[in-house]
Amino acid sequence: MADQPHDVPFEHLLRGLAPQVLGAVARRFRDFSSAEDAVQEAMIAAFRQWPKEGVPENPRGWLIQVASRRMTDHMRSELARRERETAVAAETETLTSILEIEADMDPDDTLILLFMCCHPALSPSSAITLTLRAVGGLTTAEIANAFLVPEATMAQRISRAKQTIKTSGVPFRLPSPHERTGRLPAVLHVLYLIFSEGYTSSIGSHLQRFDLACEAIRLTRSAKTLLPDNPEVVGLLALMLLTDARRAARTGPDEELIPLDKQDRTLWDRSEIAEGIELLTAALSKGSVGLYQLQAAIAAVHDEAESVEDTDWAQILALYELLNRVAPSPMVTLNLAIAAGMVHGPAKGLELLRPLDRDPRIAGHYRLDAVRAHFFEKMGDHEAAIQHYRIAAARTTSMPERNYLLTRASDLAGLA
Amino acid sequence: MKYILMMMGKKSDFDGYAKWSKEDLQANVAFMRAFSKELKETGVFVSTEGLGWPSEAKLIRAGKDGEPVTDGVFPESKEFLAGYWIIDVESPEQAYKIAARASRAPGAGAKAANMPIEVRRVLSSHADLGL
């Protein structure tokens, strides 16, 4: 919807301030969970008031003030609830000046929050929602909208996630450099999941959903500013940009899915591609090549090709072989088989797919059948291709994907 | 008053659907999109979802220990829910009219499918469900 808050100009400013304000308030009141609620309320107040009254002169101070007031109210009612005789503690907190809280801010607050929200004790979906709210500054309503669940359900998910963090007793500070290295992959994985959720759901009948892909790019950009020397953070940002560049070409006028080989490449976003390649080149020059850099390199090879035929499939195959060594997974094997099929012919591709039938992590996954169908089609075995397209259609969990696969099957059936 | 319009089909209907021509499939998808849009524009739309294929459906019961026990074998005659719309309308007649429109979705050979749409009232209080 055009009149939703995420379209208004101050939205970026507000989102960028959210983690800074939360960091300051959480540190001052030593209560992450309540501080997070208070900042959320301050954000909602800003969304309501700023468009009417204009952005305040010191927007960060404004947010800190509103959030601190909520914290004080919250502590007062907590004290009353516990039937303490006086509310001295709460009064003391009220006297804390905004300037003092602001002075307490740490430039690493966003990073601290990112590590906190992507805590290993949380399930991926909890980490995602908490990251979007606490670091991304999204409202519960927006997150609920993005995942198509009721707001009350999302609110519950967030408060349970915070409870988990509280129970785990993580202090509000930056993990040691050693700890950081160990936990960074989990942070990057959460950012990656936010991106792919947004990217895959940008098709279908839910165009009014909050744009999670853009949000993931924004969050990864801020992670890159905070960890400029980490090649995997840069690699992840490059991967997102190089993938997002194809967004406009990915769906047709009726929101139908258009696969890579049928896309109008003139619709690809050249500036995103250029930025992605520049970032990737810089990351690769640092020497330690990880899974995001490799995936970004593969995306770059696709993005640089004029057509599927022009694509340097040998290069892509070599990159998947590397990826298979760095981070082996059945999905990597599947993609490796696709590339091998392009380089050495569909029979080779089918051969490489065979072991996956015995891998419970992927056996029965629709993509396995879809790729097989594609290989059979290339070999001219239309009957087998139709059969596998239909199995894939029955197994996929995406409506546009199902429509695409069924159409592919009936296309071939029409030829017979 | 809210109604749920349920699109039902036997396994053989689903298998048949998978064999429609490209044009028929496209016409059907276009109709569904336009239909939901129309429901939204006329202010009656509440929600709609399409469901996964019946071959992926599982029937679950609690075993003795409360753990899930799967029974996936369905009789051929069983009807499966393919998808549904929930609408908020002024009268049952209005709901039936909308259901009839859904039933006219284009089917194989560009003919109206006239598929059965089960219409049920959605009860107004959720108190018993704890919502």
Image (cartoon, rainbow, N blue to C red):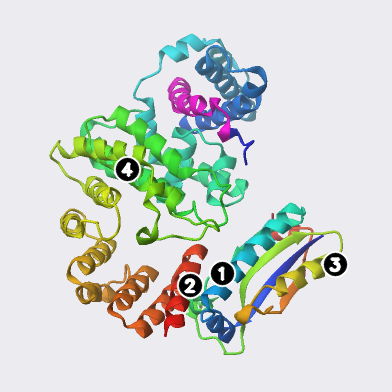
Q: Are marks 1 and 2 in contact (CB under 8 Å)?
A: yes
- How far, Cα to Cα, is label 1 from label 3? 31 Å
Which image quadrant: the C terminus of chain A? bottom left
Instruction: Decide: few, some or many residues near mark 4? Use Cα within 10 Å; few <14, some 14-19, many ≥20.
Output: many
Q: Picture quarter containing residue A84? A: top right
- How far, Cα to Cα, is label 4 from label 1? 39 Å
Magenta-span inclusion, residue A17? yes
The residue type indicated by label 4 comes to Leu
Kindly identify which residue carries mark 4: A188
Kindly identify which residue carries mark 3: B92
Q: Position of residue A292 (x, y in %)?
A: 26, 46
Q: Which structural element holds mark 3? A: helix
A301 and A266: which is toward the camera: A266
Q: Which structural element holds mark 2? A: helix
Instruction: Decide: few, some or many residues near mark 2? Use Cα within 10 Å; few <14, some 14-19, many ≥20.
Output: many
Residue at figure coordinates x 52%, y 74% from the top left: B22
Q: Which structural element holds mark 4? A: helix
Q: Are marks 4 and 1 in contact (CB under 8 Å)?
A: no
A406 and B83: which is toward the camera: A406
Against A240, residue A14 (above or below) is: above
For disc 2, the chain is A
Kindly identify which residue carries mark 2: A407
Along the horizontal axis of the image, is A316 left or right of A128? left
Q: Position of residue A361 (x, y in %)?
A: 32, 67
A124 and B56: which is toward the camera: B56
- How far, Cα to Cα, is label 1 from label 2? 8 Å
The residue type indicated by label 2 comes to Thr
- How far, Cα to Cα, is label 2 from label 4? 36 Å
- How far, Cα to Cα, is label 4 from label 3? 52 Å
